[in-house]
Amino acid sequence: GGKQDELAGRSEASCVMLSTFVASSLSLSAPIGVSRVAQSRVSCTRMSDDEPWNSNAQSSTTLDKSTLEAAYDAAMNAPAPAAAGGKQDFLEAEPYWDQSTIPVNTYKNKAPFVGKIVSTKRIVGPEATGETCDVVMSHGGKMPYWEGQSYGVIPPGTNPKNGKPNSVRLYSIASSRYGDDMTGTTTTLCVRRATYWCPELKADDPAKKGVCSNYLCDSKPGDDVKLTGPSGKVMLIPEKDPNVDLIMVATGTGIAPYRSFIRRLFVEKTPFGEAYTKGSGLAWLFLGVANSDALLYDDEWQEVLKKYPDNFRLDYALSREQKNKDGGKMYIQDKVAEYSDEIFTRMDNGAHMYFCGLKGMMPGITEMLEGVCKDKGLVWEDKLSEWKKAGQWHVEVY
């Protein structure tokens, strides 16, 4: 009897180990939909009589789908181990500037990744024109990305025009690859709620509001969110040169990729950040919004300015509060034009210039640089072609 009890105990322990192994395998392997987990049932029952070595072994331990799902969810949401000394270096390429392994389109429209909303908060003041939210979501380490890339979001529901499921919308990622919590398991998006003001109703027309932006701005912690991507290589940082100038021009939520840049450079202890802050490179941010209440992440920029005044510059264009040199509203292109000669010189010395936000800013900026070319006796088209060929000109506007 004692022998059989011992064998039964071993059988039970073996079954628990097997179940743990299965659950661990689910969390370590390529993403598996919960539907497959739901079909699984691992149980220990009395072994058949054709196993004479253990004919009477029996266990009452049962692991059903809920246990496996819980293990799967725990693995999905477990934080990645932070490196010793608090450094953010566990998601780096080797060497860190090598872009050959950048993740692209890990998840596609037909088989999106299902993440979870962690938090949603309004980040503009009461006098801002419209509402902008900071939306943090968990990907459990299963959907890594690099700074400058975008996620696709598929909002729930169907398109009333054709009855088909809603299509994907792209959003530039506003966090570094490590996420705001620096665990490598979250992503932050900066989303402006899209509304349509109807002049006849003299109110917002809910039938014409932006489907995806409203879904994200109204999301609650724990909500599922379908994600595709990451996508894009246009806005990446050239990290091989720690002395490179990065001139970043944004309107509104176009600030997103630059927040990911600046966090990598100045907030987190990354290999590139450590090299950059020891070098001569300048990260120069231009942000255009309507007024002071509409400024995005200003507290973060001010903190970086205090710590790294030699490597970071900041210029705002507040169209409803500032005047340009001609007495009109100060738009982003007007603010950039104030430094036209310096920007041109930096570009000729190898700087990279980025544009993200409303496409309306581009004509004014290109006209300004064209004027500098003319003053120098150069042909603008040739100069722009030269910058593009060298990979110095990065545009993501809408």
Image (cartoon, rainbow, N blue to C red):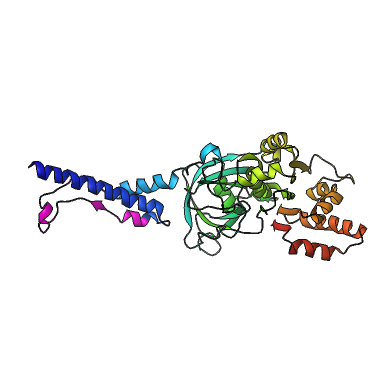
143 left or right of 389 in image? left
Quarter location, residue 48: bottom left
Residue in the picture at 56% in, 50% down: 92
Q: What's drawn in magenta, residue-wise? A: 35-62
Picture quadrant where residue 353 is located: bottom right
For residue 1, say whether it is visible.
yes
Q: Is residue 132 magenta?
A: no
The foreground one among 238 and 271 is 271
Quarter residue 181 falls in: top right
Q: Is residue 40 magenta?
A: yes
Magenta region, main secondary structure:
loop
Query: Horizontal placement of 37 versus 121: left or right?
Result: left
In the rendered image, residue 24, in percent from the top left (x then y), is placed at 36, 50
Can residue 284 be seen here? The reply is no
Q: Is residue 281 above or below residue 365?
A: above
User: Residue 101 location in percent, x, y?
Assistant: 56, 59
Percent of width and height locating residue 327: 89, 44
Position of residue 353 in the picture relative to residue 77 (left or right): right
Quarter the C terminus occupies:
bottom right
**Residue 146 spot, x, y in % from top left:** 59, 52
Residue positioned 73% across, 42% down in the render: 311
Q: Nearer the viewer, residue 334 or 392?
A: 392
On the rendered image, what quadrant is the N terminus found in?
top left
**169 or 246: which is nearer to us?**
246
* Labels in figure, total: 0
Q: Residue furthest left?
A: 1
